[in-house]
Structures are given as C-alpha cells and as structure tokens.
Amino acid sequence: MKTLVIMRHAQAAEGSPDHQRLLSDHGKSQATHVGQRVTKIVGTIDQLFVSDAKRTQETLASLQEGGLHADDVLIEPGLYLCAGDDVLDILRAKGSGDIVMVVAHEPTMSAVALELWDGKGEARFESGFPTAAAAVFKFEGDWENLPLGAMELHHFVTAP
C-alpha cells in the first residue's frame, strides 16, 4: 500500500514578489504543528517534492522542526505555477518509495486531491485547502500508474 501526502504551504506574510514571500510567524507555527501530526500518522517520508518558492521552503523547514523527516527531498520549480495534471505527471514520472509527500500551492493542491480522491468520506478540501492543510491518501499500485478517483482519504490534517 502506498501513501501520498498532499500539502499546501503554511500562511505566508504579505509582500511581493510572490515567489519570494516568506512565512508569517503564525505560518511557521502552523507548519511545525502539521509536521508533528503528519509524522504521527505516516512516519518517515520516503520522498518529498517541494516547490522552490520561499514560503514552501520555509514550510518544509518548519515541518522538519515539528519532527517530519524525509529521506529524499526534491525541489521542483515546476510546482510553483502548475496545474493539478502537472503534479500528477511529476508523481508518475519521479515518485518512488511507499510514502511520498508534495508541498506546494493552492488552488493546485485541492485540484490534485479532488482528482485522486475516491469520493468516500468527508473531504474538507472540496472548497479549497486551508493554509498548512495536508491530505493523506492511500492506494494500491505503483506511482507510474497513479489512479484517478480511486485513492482513499485517511486523514485531513489542519493547523490550529
């Protein structure tokens, strides 16, 4: 069984240019909390894809402060301004291991979650991912055959 964690970056501070925006203090606290929760749920991440934007990089650092550990971290510039299908292409081409995580942006993360979700149970991402939210999905199969509309939602983690 494979596990996929889809996460939106934590709350960013105001500013521009957008790609360089940093996390707010609250955002850092959010990501630390989510790092603790996701670690309790899935353990060590085999592979983590993260956007190259400053706020996603800072989200990753705060997740790690919360105890999250990833064996392989891949910075993917294409995750900054992409569509849900682009994320799926990255996972299908580069995904490996049993537990994979993606940290990127909205509205992409909710679009990806809705494409993958089997529709069962409550999914609070239907109206968009809140900052620092993470959806934990499970599925049978291989990354290159990532199934659409067939992943079980096991947890939806939000920050306080």
Image: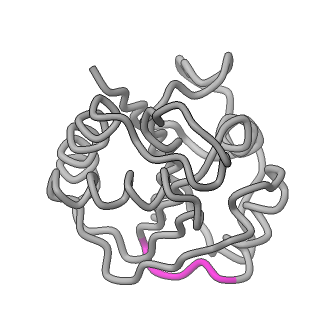
Residue 8 vertical placement versus 71 (above, below) = above
Residue 114 vertical placement versus 52 (above, below) = above
Residue 65, image x, y percentages? 16, 56
Residue 5 vertical placement versus 140 (above, below) = above
* Relative side of 101 to 144, left or right: left
Coloring scheme of the render? Answer: one colour
Taking the view exactly as shown, the residue that stands out farthest to the front is 16
Residue 24, image x, y percentages? 36, 35
Residue 12, image x, y percentages? 47, 36
Q: Residue at x 80, y 55 (%)?
A: 82
* Relative side of 110 to 11, left or right: right
Q: Say if the magenta span includes residue 103.
A: no
Chain part drawn in magenta: 94-98
Q: Quadrant of residue 1?
A: bottom left
Residue 127, image x, y percentages? 67, 16
Main SS of residues in magenta? loop
* Relative side of 5 to 116, left or right: left
